[in-house]
Image (cartoon, helix red, strand yellow):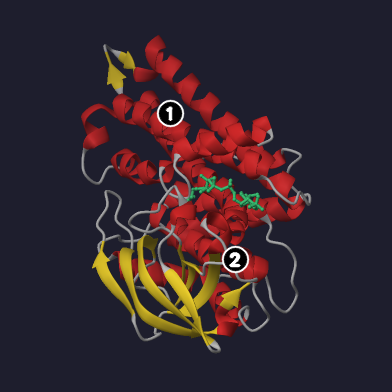
């Protein structure tokens, strides 16, 4: 059983501990799932998480709007990731995909949230493009106003849930100003004519991922989220909320790797004694535990700061994501090393963790981008 003493830290309230208990029990009953058909697995996970009520945390309740609780988002991602990376992915996308609608959507746009929170619709966040990943302001996709419609043309890539989402939040250049100030955000239902899956993308830890083509996609002006030209700030505000949750998923993977290593070190005999008797193994385990606790502190500091009403947690969220994802990679690498041959055997839990963690250091702002963000914040730029 993973160390959950962190739940007694002062960052949390009783409702967070109760949520963690309920989710842990659900995970023990329902996870892991079969990953052979990732589309089917994700749809089924979303339906089941919705039925069990866990997706309510992923978006605001339009009938009773209160800010997203980032601590609950982080606890949920950490717990799901510890049991099954695909379950974490399915939950995370319901939040990231609808984040702009939760934070800035009109009541009409927020009707989507009733469905996504119940697990009856899947959502996706369409920001990245072939020539604009880290450099969001360099976006090329256009949205041109034509009467009471906008017409979207261009491409989006690396879109998680691409091809299985029911609704996309899409960012496109509306041209109010060059760069970051000329981008807007739109709600685009997946069945809008002209929106097509151009390519499915296969990655080392398979999940639904696609390149999307927008060929003269017409949406009503009411699909605009916020005001024209506010899209970049909307995207950054969404990432401020969800970046610490990426750290939380990495923390879940790292905790699982640590648990597996502790049990391996206690049971595996080497040179006539348990592996754990080797000081070098003890040293690795100490480093792993230290990184896990330090990551948890940064993640829940960021989440608590946001939940306490801070308008921006850009610095805290970037630190949490950077540290937790980079350190989880190191923790998992040590776990693989201590597991020896088994650690690289297809299907072994630490082998899958080794594949699962890598993309987290890239998506929602690569580690290198987080350093830019932190440095700018520290320098007051
Ligand atoms: N919240 C609100 N507003 C923000 C913000 C935030 N977190 N970050 C920046 N802004 C605002 C700035 O204040 C600035 O406003 P003004 O024009 O009024 O001054 C505007 O947005 C532009 O900001 P900046 O000049 O910093 O933009 P850059 O193009 O230099 O942005 C980074 C650079 C690298 C920080 C940004 O492009 C980024 O985060 N990239 C990573 C993208 C990412 O995560 N991609 C993954 C997509 S999801 S898989």
Q: Confirm or reject: label 2 Cβ below 8 Å from ligand 1.
A: no
The tag on residue 280 is: none
The tag on residue 229 is: 2
Residue density around tag 1, few if under 14, some if 14–19, many if 20 or more, within 10 Å = some
Residue density around tag 2, few if under 14, some if 14–19, many if 20 or more, within 10 Å = many
| Residue 278 seen from this side | no
Q: Which circle, 2 or 1, is nearer the viewer?
A: 2
Mark toward the start of the polypeptide (2 vs 1): 2
Q: From the viewer's side, name the closer residue of 251 and 257.
A: 251
Q: Which residue shows up at 74% across the image and 71% down it? A: 65
x and y percentages locating residue 134 in the rendered image: 44, 47
x and y percentages locating residue 136 in the rendered image: 47, 53
Q: Quadrant of the C terminus?
A: top right
The tag on residue 262 is: 1
Q: Between marks 2 and 1, how big is the CA–CA gap?
A: 51 Å
Q: From the viewer's side, name the closer residue of 3 and 13.
A: 13
x and y percentages locating residue 230 in the rendered image: 62, 64
Q: Quadrant of residue 15?
A: bottom right
Residue 374 horizontal side relative to residue 46, left or right: right
Question: Quick check: marks 2 and 1 in contact, CB under 8 Å?
Answer: no
Q: From the viewer's side, name the closer residue of 95 and 117.
A: 95
Badge 2 marks a residue whose secondary structure is: loop
């Amino acid at each position: 059983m993973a160390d959950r003493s962190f739940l007694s830290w002062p960052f949390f309230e009783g409702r967070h501990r109760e949520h963690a208990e309920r989710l842990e029990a659900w995970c023990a009953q329902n996870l892991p799932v079969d990953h052979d058909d990732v589309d089917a697995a994700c749809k089924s996970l979303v339906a089941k998480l919705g039925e069990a009520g866990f997706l309510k945390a992923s978006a605001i309740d339009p009938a009773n709007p209160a800010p997203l609780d980032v601590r609950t988002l982080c606890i949920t991602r950490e717990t799901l990731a510890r049991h099954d990376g695909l379950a974490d992915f399915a939950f995370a996308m319901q939040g990231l995909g609808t984040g702009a609608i939760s934070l800035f959507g009109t009541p009409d746009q927020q009707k989507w949230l009733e469905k996504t929170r119940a697990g009856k619709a899947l959502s996706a966040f369409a920001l990245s493009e072939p020539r604009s990943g880290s450099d969001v302001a360099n976006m090329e996709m256009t949205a041109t106003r034509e009467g009471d419609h906008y017409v979207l043309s261009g491409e989006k890539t690396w879109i998680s849930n691409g091809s299985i989402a029911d609704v996309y939040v899409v960012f496109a250049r509306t041209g109010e100003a060059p760069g970051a100030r000329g981008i807007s955000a739109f709600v685009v239902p997946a069945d809008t004519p002209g929106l097509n899956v151009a390519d499915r993308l296969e990655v080392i830890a398979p999940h639904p991922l696609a390149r999307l083509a927008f060929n003269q996609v017409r949406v009503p002006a009411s699909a605009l989220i916020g005001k024209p030209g506010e899209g970049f700030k909307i995207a950054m505000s969404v990432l401020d909320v969800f970046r610490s949750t990426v750290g939380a998923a990495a923390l879940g993977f790292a905790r699982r790797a640590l648990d597996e290593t502790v049990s391996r070190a206690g049971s595996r005999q080497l040179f006539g004694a348990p592996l754990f008797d080797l000081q070098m193994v003890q040293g690795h385990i100490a480093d792993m535990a230290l990184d896990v606790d330090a990551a948890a502190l940064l993640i829940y500091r960021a989440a608590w700061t946001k939940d306490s009403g801070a308008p921006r947690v850009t610095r805290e969220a970037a630190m949490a994501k950077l540290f937790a994802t980079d350190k989880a990679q190191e923790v998992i690498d040590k776990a693989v090393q201590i597991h020896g041959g088994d650690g690289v055997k297809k299907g072994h839990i630490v082998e899958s963790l080794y594949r699962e963690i890598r993309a987290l250091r890239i998506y929602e702002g690569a580690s290198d981008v987080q350093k830019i963000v932190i440095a700018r914040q520290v320098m007051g730029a």
